[in-house]
Amino acid sequence: MSGGGRQVARSRDDEVDQCWCVFDIEWPKNHPNLKQAIRLAQEHGIRLAISNPCFELWLILHFEDQTAFIGTKEAESRSRKLDGRSGKRIDPNQYMPRRHEAVRRALLLAQRHARHQSSCPDDNPSSAMGELLAAIQGLDRTVR
């Protein structure tokens, strides 16, 4: 989340349609400037794709629902078991066909958090990666 000034400057560029910052919470430590970064982004029209607790939650959502609180280590381990990888590199052939389902699951989590009025960082599990993917690919953001 460092370098917020660069994102703000880039978001003002007339050639930029949208500006996004992608990061995760890394529970249980959380980033010390999380609320400040969120506020700065909102003030400058920068969209956020935050995964809580970590990016691996987004990977899990490609394979199955995750509605209960989950820690970073558990999410990392579970995502590796689901796709069979041993390191950080993912196989796009496993994820691309499942991306629409991952978007649907992420949107359902967002709706659930909205109903309960929970927001970052109290919205574990959550991932706005589906919003980013929907913006990039022009996907339907309604949940069916």
Image (cartoon, helix red, strand yellow):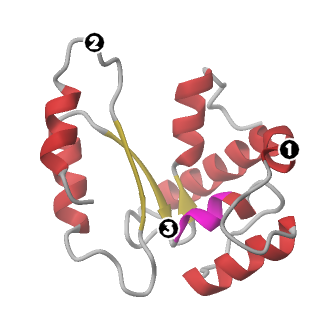
Disc 2 and disc 3 in contact, CB within 8 angstroms: no
Q: Earlier in the sequence, mark 2 or mark 3?
A: 2
Q: Is residue 139 left or right of residue 100?
A: left
**x, y (%) of residue 136?**
55, 26
Q: Residue drawn at (21%, 30%), measured in percent from left and top? A: 10
Per the image, label 1 sits on a secondary structure element best described as helix
Callout 2 amino acid:
Glu
Task: Using the image, tell me which numbered label, if any, was put on residue 15.
Answer: 2
Callout 1 amino acid:
Asn
Task: Using the image, tell me which numbered label, if any, was put on residue 144.
Answer: none
Spatial CA span between label 2 and label 3? 31 Å
Callout 3 amino acid:
Asn
Disc 2 and disc 1 in contact, CB within 8 angstroms: no
**x, y (%) of residue 29?**
37, 86
Image quarter of the N terminus: bottom left
Front-most of residues 65 and 48: 48
Front-most of residues 21 and 67: 21
Res 71 seen here: no
Disc 3 and disc 1 in contact, CB within 8 angstroms: no
Q: Residue drawn at (61%, 86%), measured in percent from left and top? A: 73
Q: Earlier in the sequence, mark 2 or mark 1?
A: 2
Task: Using the image, tell me which numbered label, if any, was put on residue 52.
Answer: 3
**x, y (%) of residue 21?**
36, 46
Q: Is residue 119 magenta?
A: no
Residue where numbered disc 1 is placed = 93
Per the image, label 3 sits on a secondary structure element best described as strand
- By secondary structure, the bulk of the magenta-drawn segment is best described as helix
**x, y (%) of residue 121?**
38, 70
